[in-house]
Image (spheres, rainbow, N blue to C red):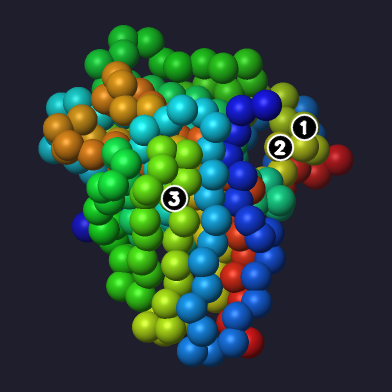
């Protein structure tokens, strides 16, 4: 079964507006971490933000915030005040705590295109 | 500067040939990973290593091999047994402390094309 589901293959957003990227996850492990990465056209993966399953508050990093709804198993990324440089592919990923490895499971990604 | 380097950036291979992709890190990370990415798709784990001289298969290890003789280096060999090797390959590394929160740092990737 898919551990991470990103249902939006592509999205368009107007410059300076906010955009929400959906991510749902599946785990029975009470301890887990959720990550968002950005992949520009150059291909390199850039870490954006992290949310732990026991964190009480939603994570924020500059213009990035994570809307964490634990009961719904969703961890949506919100990008505020979009910039042209935000055009990229965005991946949600999860690490489960009870496994003895440090593997990440990735979703299929969402392509964001910011329009001027 | 600390980081992960991958070489070459582009690699062309004839069918039936083995090729080795290089991955080096100077972040002093214990764990290293290899991922494969197909166009428009997410990342799939090929192999990973948490310590020198030890490594484990990921989800799609068939047709690939790795070695971890040094902490800094984790080369990936794409063998002729890999039926569809054309893809983008990403190497990553992380610490193994603080089990949940360890972001993985990625290299710039190698784009492999089989001719």
Image quarter where the C terminus of chain A lies is top right
User: Marks 2 and 1, how far apart in space?
Assistant: 5 Å
Q: Which residue is mark 3?
A: B74
Where does residue B18 sit, x and y in percent of width and height? Answer: 48, 78
Percent x, y of residue A40:
68, 46
Residue at the spot 53% in from the left edge and 38% down from the top edge: B25
Q: Is residue B78 above or below residue B14?
A: above
What residue is shown at x 15% (from left), y 27% (from top)?
A30
Q: Which residue is mark 2?
A: A86
Label 3 or label 2, whichever lies nearer to me, is 3
Q: Is residue A100 visible?
A: yes
Residue under the point 68% across and 66% down: B10
In the structure shown, which secondary structural element does the residue marked by tag 3 occupy? loop
Q: Chain of mark 1?
A: A
Mark 3–mark 2 Cα distance, whole angstroms, equals 31 Å
For the point 71% across and 51% down, the residue is A42
Report x, y in % for residue B42. Answer: 47, 56
Mark 1 sits on what residue?
A83
């Amino acid at each position: 079964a898919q551990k991470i589901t990103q249902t939006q293959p592509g999205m368009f957003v107007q410059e300076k507006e906010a955009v929400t990227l959906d991510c749902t996850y599946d785990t029975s492990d009470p301890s887990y971490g959720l990550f968002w990465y950005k992949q520009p056209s150059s291909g390199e993966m850039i870490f954006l933000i992290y949310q732990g399953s026991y964190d009480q508050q939603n994570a924020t990093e500059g213009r990035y915030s994570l809307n964490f709804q634990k009961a719904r198993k969703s961890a949506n990324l919100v990008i505020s005040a979009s910039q042209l440089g935000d055009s990229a592919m965005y991946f949600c990923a999860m690490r489960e705590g009870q496994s003895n490895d440090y593997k990440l499971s990735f979703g299929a990604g969402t392509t964001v295109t910011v329009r001027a | 500067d600390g980081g992960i380097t991958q070489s070459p950036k582009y690699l062309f291979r004839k069918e039936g040939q083995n090729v080795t992709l290089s991955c080096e890190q100077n972040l002093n990370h214990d764990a290293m990973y290899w991922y494969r990415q197909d166009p428009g798709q997410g990342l799939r784990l090929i192999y990973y290593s948490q310590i020198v001289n030890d490594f484990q298969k990921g989800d799609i290890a068939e047709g690939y091999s790795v070695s971890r003789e040094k902490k800094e280096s984790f080369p990936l060999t794409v063998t002729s047994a890999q039926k569809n090797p054309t893809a983008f390959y990403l190497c990553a590394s992380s610490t193994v402390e603080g089990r949940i929160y360890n972001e993985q740092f990625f290299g710039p990737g190698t784009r492999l094309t089989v001719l």
